[in-house]
Image: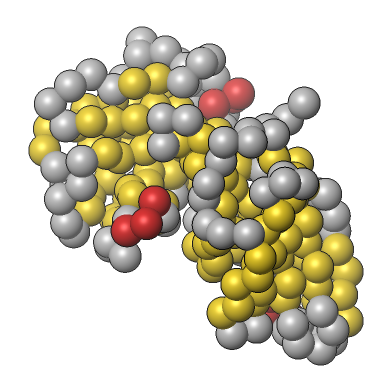
Amino acid sequence: SAVISQKPSRDICQRGTSLTIQCQVDSQVTMMFWYRQQPGQSLTLIATANQGSEATYESGFVIDKFPISRPNLTFSTLTVSNMSPEDSSIYLCSVPGRGEKLFFGSGTQLSVL
Amino acid sequence: QKEVEQNSGPLSVPEGAIASLNCTYSDRGSQSFFWYRQYSGKSPELIMFIYSNGDKEDGRFTAQLNKASQYVSLLIRDSQPSDSATYLCAFLAAGNKLTFGGGTRVLVKP
């Protein structure tokens, strides 16, 4: 499986500010996925980041709130904009491996005050 | 109806016993199924995947798939305290998107 580095690992932010989360993979991948895990909940897909094209967002998630960049095949960022306490979650980037398996980065624990 | 249903637990299991986790899914077209283990404060870790009906064994883990009943299960034999975690069932939905259940929390008591 790929080695997926995600940072920051955790942050505490003030309401109304933005945080950019970085995800670096040690091999080239066509698709990268961003998930959110709210406290005590399962994982929800935010968007799929494809290199060279706009990210594809799932229902309930919009680009203005969660802008994504994908400048090359090994890197992506997710920004959580104009944060509110409801954005307090774990944010996870993930990449596909062989046989449709999905592997996750270590996650970013975000707390919004 | 949720796409993936799991009993949230906690499932309390004595050390050395078999833990049995169940998952039902709604998408009859799904072909690929996965079990992830997530320790508290950590990211999910893939532990099993299964594509065909029947059983698949890997060490102390056995995944069972019944596509006709839209049911997938995970057995953990000889449960250890280190198996205490949340286990997430997932399937590959349309558009190659992995859809997760709510997870079952397992507690293995020494």
Q: Is residue A75 left or right of residue B26?
A: left
Relative to B104, A80 lies left or right = left
| Residue at image point 36% right, 38% down | A33
Quadrant where the N terminus of chain B sits is top right
Query: Could you tell me how many numbered marks the image carries?
Result: 0
Residue A81 placement (x, y as % from top left): 39, 19
Mark yes or no: residue B40 visible: no
Taking B68 as reference, is B59 left or right?
A: left
Q: Quadrant of the C terminus of chain B?
A: bottom right
Q: Is residue B77 above or below residue A110?
A: below
Q: Where in the figure is residue A94, as x and y percent of width and height?
A: 37, 47
The one nearer the camera, A7 or A77, is A77
Which quadrant holds residue B63?
bottom right
- Across and down, in percent, residue A100 comes to 39, 51
Residue drawn at 40 percent across, 20 percent down: A57
**Residue at the location (85% across, 55% down)?**
B9
Q: Up-down: is A20 above or below B90?
A: above
Residue nearest the observer in this picture, A109 or A43: A43
Q: Please, which colouring scheme is shown?
A: secondary structure
Q: Nearer the viewer, residue A78 or A85?
A: A78
- The answer to whether residue B13 is seen in the rendering is yes
Residue B35 screen position, x and y as percent: 59, 59
Q: Is residue B100 above or below residue B86?
A: above
